[in-house]
Amino acid sequence: MLGAIVGGVASLAGIGTNIRAAREKRKIERENNALYNGIIEETKADKKENEKMYNRAMSENYLDTAEARSSLAQLRESSKKQLESATNNLIRNGATEESKIAVASGLNRNYADAASRMAGLATKYREDATDRYLQQKDKYNSILYNAWMNRANMNGNIGNSKANAAARYGNMAAGALKELVGTGIFN
């Protein structure tokens, strides 16, 4: 009889411990789900921002970028200084108006050629933007995949822990019942 009582008390203590463990596991599960949900939402937001940046780069005229405007401004300033210098030299040497026009025309042609080459850089600019976009997209997809897999693994581990706890409850109950049956209470 004493064995049955001890077994019953031990069984109740084990059940209490398992209930506390189950509560702790549910708490951990909620925290992990919140963490994974946060990662997933943040990654989705980053993915949308990447998409916006890509669309902006694809619709932007390269010659309107700060880089192109700066280069063209430097080229204009350089051409202006060269034209002033060449004009002063031509005046000093008594050159004709035709030679002054020829020098100015040559400098304008250089400017136009440089602007044309810069327009050609637009293709590279778009290709680079596409490469960056695709790399970021792959990165975000990888983050999402890993978050979902980790979440699935975590939930699987929690499920296994719950199944193990249920098996322990069953074993403790069976042991306590066996003790009680062995004492003759149920006979």
Image (spheres, helix red, strand yellow):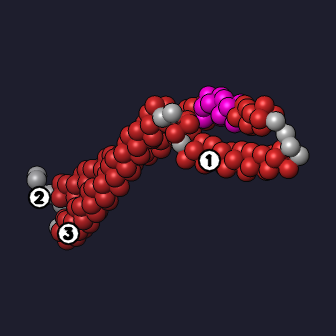
Residue visible at 27% across and 60% down?
27
Number of other residues with Cα within 10 Å of mark 2, as a class: few under 14, some 14 to 19, many 20 or more? few
Q: Which residue is mark 2?
A: 185
Q: Which dot, 3 or 1, sits closer to the camera? A: 1
Please, what secondary structure does the residue beneath circle 2 have? loop
Q: Which dot, 2 or 3, sits closer to the camera? A: 3
Q: Which residues are magenta?
A: 110-125
135 up-or-down from 93: above or below? above
Q: Which residue is mark 1?
A: 73
Q: Which dot, 2 or 1, sits closer to the camera? A: 1
Residue visible at 68% across and 31% down?
112
Q: Are marks 2 and 1 in contact (CB under 8 Å)?
A: no
Circle 2: residue type:
Ile
Q: Which residue is mark 3?
A: 9
**Which comes before the other along the chain, label 3 or label 1?**
3
**Image-based side of 138 in relation to 22, left or right:** right
